[in-house]
Image (spheres, rainbow, N blue to C red):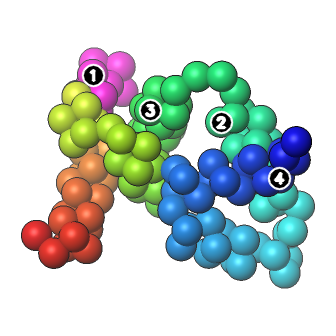
Amino acid sequence: MASKREIGEALLRRVDGERVADNLAGAYADIAPDFVRYLTEFAFGEIYAREGDLKQRELVAIASLATMGGCDAQLETHVHGAFNVGLSQDEIVEAVMTLIPYIGFPKALVAMATVKRVVEKRSRAAGF
């Protein structure tokens, strides 16, 4: 049976990609190794590993981060993650559109700008 760390690392790589997972581990290993361990084992090894749909989890993450504001880097990571687990551009855009009456236009504009930035980055990376 796989450990929470192994399950978490696999899900982190599936959702956020190899580079993000490697950068995260490298960025904090020297000053806060437990930070990476908690993120990997708890957030991904327990919460993301629960029975359910990764697409739904990514939509919840996007909505939560957009609502909080000031989490632009994490929002961008989770928009990439939403694409990585199979959500379409239309599904992600509609999720942000649904937030407008709840979080207001300023935060929704930031979220939509993040979605646009991710779409453009992914298009350039794919050679389009």
In the rendered view, tell whether residue 39 sits above or below residue 66: below
Residue type highlighted by circle 4: Arg
Whole-percent x and y of residue 55?
44, 32
Which marked residue is nearer to the observer: mark 1 or mark 3?
Answer: 3
- How packed is label 3: few (under 14 Cα within 10 Å), some, or many (20 or more)? many
Residue type highlighted by circle 1: Thr
Residue 97 in the magenta stretch? The answer is yes
Residue at point 84%, 81% (across, down): 30
Q: In the rendered view, does 7 fall on the left or right side of 69?
A: right
| Residue 52, quarter of the rendered image | top right
Which residue matches tag 4? 5
Disc with the residue nearer the chain's start (1 vs 4): 4
Task: Name the chief secondary structure element in magenta.
Answer: helix
Residue type highlighted by circle 3: Lys
Which marked residue is nearer to the observer: mark 1 or mark 2?
Answer: 2
In the rendered view, tell whether residue 56 sits above or below residue 121: above
Region in magenta: 95-104
Q: How far apart, in angstroms, are the residues tagged by discs 3 and 2?
A: 11 Å
| Residue 22, quarter of the rendered image | bottom right
